[in-house]
Image: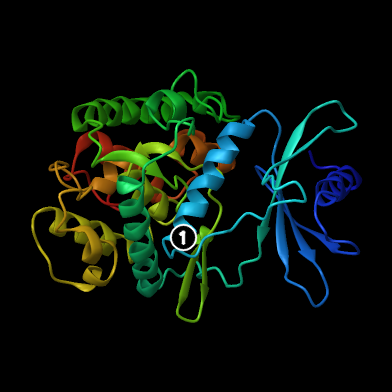
């Protein structure tokens, strides 16, 4: 789905369902989905998302939009879908290649992505908004027919993984395979023991990285709910730390989670997630009492991480030291030597 002329054809076909004559359409990104910026002169700006075919059904997309609408009504700054002439939020488009695609138009959200330097303030912002998101998820009554993907070991890293098999990536070696497989066996067993009680397992963003945060002054906005689904709430913390495990500030985030899990209430994190949630019965860190929670949940995104960085994975020798460290730490526990010690 990367031919430019084809993509613009589909974008204009989607916009035919709106009163947006003479709108300028500009391709922004091609990733899992295709995103366009839609400029309308003196009128509001929009973002058009063209879905990849064969991944989400219209019912799944509609369920995502229902949650976004509820979050917006609750005061969270999230993308707001725009109805077309017929009141529908989803445009279903027949394409010249015979494959039906879905598209959604959203109001534009201004802001900048926090830098890769990971200022602790950025994590504090992310923590605050994540706490509100999870609180809403726990108490929001989903309508009959609500359906989203369920992110579990089977659907993320098992034989039926929705993103493909992690063990089939190019360059996978026996050493890397054995290390990742052992990690996943340990994580899967501990997640089974941890359980799926409603206070631990529910509707989450599922890709809650700093890259999906927009900051504008005092405003903190969440975007890209395309992978939202049912999973452990701590999965969102794992996603926040993914790609940044070896950053100097990462241990602070993990140790803070561990302290608050054990009853501590001080520290900068009080202004983040745990300031909002650590005294509630829904504290997502409770019960994970052997390692900091991110170590356990953090192994779950590895299938996608391996796919995204296949060039640095072979044997784990060419990748960052943190890659080997996180996997071995998940298997062997807190006394595994830190990066640089092995």
Closest to the observer: 180 or 77? 77
Q: Name the residue under label 1.
A: 73
**Quick check: can you spot residue 310?**
no
Residue at position x 42%, y 68% in the image: 118
Image position, residue 124 (x, y; %): 34, 69
Residue at image position (53%, 43%) is: 64
As drawn, the residue found furthest toward the front would be 86
Q: Is there any visible trace of residue 24 in the rendered image? A: yes
**What residue lies at 44% left-to-right and 50% top-to-bottom?**
320
| Residue 150 in the image: above or below residue 253 | above
Name, please, the residue furthest toward the top. Answer: 159
> Which quarter of the rendering shows the N terminus?
top right
> Which residue, as the protein is rendered here, is positioned at the far left?
263
301 relative position to 296: left or right = right
Image coordinates of residue 39 in percent, x first then y, are 80, 68
SS assignment at label 1: helix
- Residue at position x 57%, y 59% in the image: 79
- Dot 1 crowding, Cα within 10 Å, few <14, some 14–19, many 20+: few
Drawn side of residue 158 relative to residue 58, left or right: left
For the rendered model, the colour scheme is rainbow
174 and 158: which one is in front?
158
Count of numbered badges drawn on the protein: 1
The foreground one among 243 and 82 is 82
- In percent of width and height, residue 212 lies at 52, 58
Location of residue 5 in the rendering, given as x and y in whole percent from the top left corner: 91, 46
Nearer the observer, 190 or 282: 282
Q: Is residue 156 above or below residue 281?
A: above
Asked whether, in this view, residue 287 is left or right of residue 222, the answer is: left
């Amino acid at each position: 789905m990367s031919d430019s002329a084809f993509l613009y054809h589909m974008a204009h076909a989607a916009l035919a369902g709106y009163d947006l004559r003479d709108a300028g359409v500009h391709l922004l990104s091609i990733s899992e989905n295709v995103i366009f910026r839609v400029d309308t002169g003196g009128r509001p700006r929009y973002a058009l998302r063209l879905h990849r075919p064969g991944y989400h059904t219209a019912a799944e997309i509609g369920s995502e939009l229902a949650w976004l609408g509820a979050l917006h009504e609750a005061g969270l700054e999230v993308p707001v879908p725009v109805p077309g002439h017929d009141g529908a939020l989803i445009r279903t488009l027949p394409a010249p290649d015979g494959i039906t695609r879905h598209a959604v138009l959203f109001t534009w959200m201004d802001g900048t992505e926090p830098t890769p330097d990971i200022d602790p303030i950025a994590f504090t912002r992310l923590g605050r908004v994540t706490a509100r998101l999870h609180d809403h998820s726990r108490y929001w009554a989903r309508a009959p027919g609500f359906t989203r993907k369920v992110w579990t070991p089977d659907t993320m890293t098992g034989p039926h993984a929705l993103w493909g098999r992690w063990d089939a990536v190019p360059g996978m070696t026996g050493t890397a395979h054995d290390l990742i497989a052992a990690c996943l066996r340990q994580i899967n067993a501990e997640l089974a023991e941890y359980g799926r009680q409603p206070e631990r397992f529910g509707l989450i963003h599922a890709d809650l990285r700093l890259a999906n945060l927009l900051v504008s002054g005092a405003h903190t906005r969440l975007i890209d709910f395309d992978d939202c689904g049912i999973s452990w709430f701590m999965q969102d913390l794992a996603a926040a730390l993914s790609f940044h495990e070896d950053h100097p500030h990462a241990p602070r985030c993990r140790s803070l989670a561990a302290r608050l899990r054990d009853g501590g209430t001080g520290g900068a994190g009080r202004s983040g997630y745990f300031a909002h949630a650590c005294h509630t019965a829904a504290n997502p860190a409770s019960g994970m009492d052997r390692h900091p929670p991110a170590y356990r949940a953090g192994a779950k995104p590895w299938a996608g991480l391996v796919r995204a960085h296949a060039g640095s994975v072979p044997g784990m020798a060419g990748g960052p030291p943190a890659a080997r460290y996180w996997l071995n730490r998940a298997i062997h526990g807190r006394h595994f030597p830190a990066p640089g010690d092995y």
